[in-house]
Image (spheres, rainbow, N blue to C red):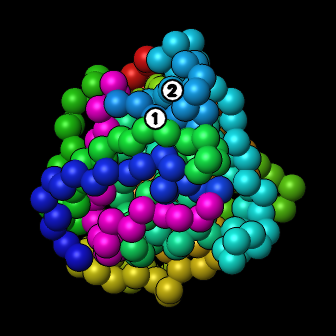
Amino acid sequence: MGIVPKTPFKIEAKVNSSTESTFFDTKIDLDYGDLLIVDVDTQEKWSAYGFSSKSWVNANGISFATQTNDGIYQEPAGTARGIAQSADFQFPFGSLIGTVDNGTTYFPIGTHLELTVLRSGRLKLVFWGGDHNTNDGAIVANIEVRKAFNHDATIDNNIALYGNHFDVHSRVHSLFGKADTETHLNTHIELKPEDVLTIDVHPKDLWSVISDGRAWDLNANGLGEDNKTKWGAGFAGKNFIFQSGTLVGTLDDGKTYFAVGTHLKLTVLNPGTLKLVHWDQDYTNNNGSVRAFVNVDRK
């Protein structure tokens, strides 16, 4: 769809509940490489149990009364309500969650998200968990879509602004790497709910999915130097689909994955250890590495 100016969308806990599969359709079709930005006022609240004061939470699922989540809701993989969900997903009750494949997979949004789109699709939002009979309240999500990053884009070159940096190697850290080895790069960064995680990779920093020549040198978005060329059509690995050559992250040791690409700013909903991986199916052909600059702002 390209550029979308900041637009407010009202999501209602009773109407747009994940347990009913009644997603809020933003009617925004995200294109590959777009930068999606979502902001929600941290003081707005809704509830899975409107009659309980501690169950009123913000879009991160954090209770205003207890300053912690009001429970975790899990949806196991399988077909339910006509949706074939590909993996187990769990988030705090009342957290704001997104999907671009109509509920086959989900990603956290919370009160703030800046996401490089590595899989095109229609953006839909949902209140996580609860029952429409007991849910109450609504929040407003302000959404904008900016032009895709390209090789002329810049990130701040003052690495002192980032707490850490990690070199992710396309061969060593390939999703399907050498047998009996840990293929994920373990940053050993422990993240807690409402931490804000930022990851940046310079758009000109390239690695390769085909080591013979430089025809398939790609950046962390999986795009060639023309900012258009992609190797293949992407592939499904461990229940998720991303383009080959992209940088992907996980907080639960590979049970679920989220897009990183050249830029991610994520409000953490579930605690976990940050691990990074090169999304590819044949490590033997890979070459090169990219440097991921990582910063965490604690609540």
In the image, residue 206 above or below residue 295: below
- Within 10 Å of the Cα at label 1, are there few (<14), some (14-19), or many (20+) other Cα atoms? many
Q: Residue 122: where, in percent of width, then height?
A: 39, 73
In percent of width and height, residue 166 lies at 49, 39
Give the image quarter of residue 137: top left
Q: Residues within 10 Å of mark 2 (few under 14, many from 20)?
A: many
Q: Are marks 1 and 2 in contact (CB under 8 Å)?
A: yes
**Is residue 182 left or right of 83 when viewed as pictured?**
right
Q: Which residue is under mark 2? A: 56
Please identify the quadrant where the N terminus is shown: bottom left
Residue carrying label 1: 46
Q: Percent x, y for residue 145?
A: 22, 60
Q: Is residue 184 above or below residue 119?
A: above
> Is any atom of residue 190 visible in this view?
no
Q: Alpha carbon of mark 1 to alpha carbon of mark 2: how far?
A: 5 Å
Give the SS element for disc 1.
strand
User: At 58% across and 72% down in the image, what residue appears?
Assistant: 241
Give the quarter of the image for residue 34.
Answer: bottom left
Which amino acid type is shown beneath numbered disc 2?
A: Trp
Q: Nearer the viewer, residue 61 or 280?
A: 61
Q: Is residue 176 above or below residue 164?
A: below
Side of 72 where 198 appears, left or right = left
Residue 173 is one of the magenta-drawn residues: no
**Would you say 291 lies left or right of 268 here?**
left
- Residue 39 found in image quarter: top left
- Residue 248: give x, y in percent of width and height: 53, 56
Span shown in magenta: 20-43
Task: Looking at the image, tell me whether mark 1 or mark 2 is earlier in sequence order.
Answer: 1
Q: Which mark is residue 254?
A: none
